[in-house]
Structure formats: structure tokens, C-alpha cells
Image (tube, rainbow, N blue to C red):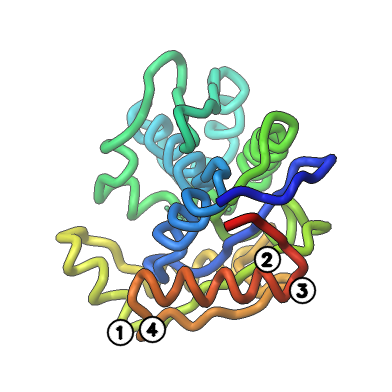
Amino acid sequence: MGLIANQYHVAIAIDGPAASGKSTIARMLAKKLGLVMVNSGEMYRAVTWKILEAGIDPRDVSTIVKALGDMHLDCGINGCFSTIAIDGRLLRDELRSENVNRAVSVVSAIAAVRSRLVSLQREYLQTTSLVMEGRDIGSVVFPKTPYKIYVDASADVRAARRLAEGVTDSVVSRDQADSSRETAPLIVADGAVVLDNSHHTVDSAVEAALVILRGQGLRWSE
Ligand code: DC
């Protein structure tokens, strides 16, 4: 499959709360449509990891803003996935640690962190068409894209998913923080269609997402 030729790069925005299944849907969509999948949460996780590694308190905004100025963030693409390195270190499994899970909502609420990362997220579109998943992709990062899905699932289903992954992650309190922060809170963006992923299989969720995108005007060749 591939997008039908378009003069401009296309952004598909997939937003939603933690453990709603948006990463899986975004990855499968990217694969089916031949696009790059960019995981914006990993960028917030990477900055959080670096702050913790430097021994900085995640609530110490002024020290974090100063440290951010000295951080070299390298956002790249490997095959059809985004990558992130900080100060030359490529980050992968450490992004999912329990310490990062606990601190990431606090760090990602800082306006200076968001503006630095939003700029880097927008830069991807200079290079490629993409599926980007996160919390504010349809509302802030690419508000003009017509292709927006908000993936939701019940709190019980989301908590059970994390448990099955063997990860300690209090998704409810993280969502509360992500939805109530002042800068770029998690919302259903203007024009986004909600996909309730509480009871879908992966395949049926991807089919439902493709139906939504077709309704929003996206065209691709099978
Ligand atoms: O998608 P995730 O659960 O890996 O994201 C981790 C955290 O990063 C999430 O709790 C809030 C923050 N985040 C954000 O504020 N904005 C985004 N676009 C993506 C993630």
C-alpha cells in the first residue's frame, strides 16, 4: 500500500491517553501506508530520562530549563521508525523504566520542554510523510492536518494492558496530569474522530482507523 501521490508531505495525527493502543495502531497504519511512524512520547520520555540521570528533581523547572539548553537532542529515522539520541546516546529500553513513567508527566508539562520538542516534531514533516502519535499532535503540532484520530479505551482496559505488559505505570494519574496541564493538554482535537479501542482486536482497530482516514479524505493504493 502507499499514499496516492501528493505534492506535500502528509501528517496523520494519532492522539489519546496512555495504554489506549495508539502506538500499535500508529505503527500498523504506518506499515500499511508506507509512512514513517514517529512516537512523540519517546521524545518526552528521553528528556525525562536525561533529567533523572543528571540527578535533577523533575519539579525543579528552572534547573530543567537550563539543562534543556545544554542538551543535544538528535531526532532521526531508522527504517520506518523515529529514533532519539541525547548527547550522543541512542535511547531505547531505558525510556520505559518505572522512574521515567513516574516523572514524565511532570517534565512534559513544562512549556519550554514542549516548545523545544514541538519544533523537532514539526521538522520531521520536512523530510517525510508520517504517522505521529502523542497527546497534542492534532491540536498543537499539526493542527491543520485533516487526518486526525483520537484513540480511547476504558480505564480498566488500559490498566489491564499495562499489567499484561508487566509494567508499573499508573495510567489514570498520568492521564489526569496530561489532561489537566495548562500547556497543550490532552484533548480531542478539532476535527478528530474518536476510535473506541476498548474491545477491538489489533486488526479490527486498524481497519476502523483506515475507515476514519478514508472518511477524512486520505487516499492510498492497495
Ligand atoms: O505516549 P507515552 O505514554 O509514551 O507518553 C509519555 C508521556 O509523554 C505522557 O504521559 C505525556 C507526554 N507526552 C506529551 O505530553 N505529549 C505528547 N505529544 C506525547 C507524550
Q: Is residue 27 left or right of residue 201?
A: right
In the picture shown, does residue 38 fall above or below 149? above
Kind of residue at disc 2 = Lys
Marks 1, 4: nearer the viewer: 4
The first of marks 1 and 3 along the sequence is 1
Answer above or below: position of 23 versus 116: below
Q: Residue at x 46, y 22 (%)?
A: 86
Separation (CA) of disc 1 from disc 3: 27 Å
Q: Are there few (<14), some (14-19), or many (20+) residues within 10 Å of tag 4?
A: some
Type of the residue with mark 3: Gly
Q: Quadrant of residue 163?
A: bottom left
Residue highlighted by disc 2: 148
Quadrant containing the C terminus in the rendered view: bottom right
Amino acid residing under circle 1: Asp
Q: Residue visible at 62% across and 69% down?
A: 149
Which of the two residues, 144 or 109, is positioned nearer the viewer here? 144
Residue 94: name its quadrant.
Answer: top left
Q: Earlier in the sequence, mark 4 or mark 3?
A: 3
Q: Do residues under tags 1 and 3 come within 8 Å of each other at their CB atoms?
A: no
Looking at the rendered structure, which numbered label has been put on residue 191?
3
Q: What crowding class fits label 2: few (fewer than 14 Cα within 10 Å), some (14-19), or many (20 or more)?
A: many
Q: Earlier in the sequence, mark 1 or mark 4?
A: 1
Who's the residue at 77% across and 67% down the image? 217
The residue under the point 50% across, 39% down is: 43
Q: Which residue is mark 1?
A: 156
Would you call the spot at circle 3 few (<14 residues within 10 Å), some (14-19), or many (20 or more)? some
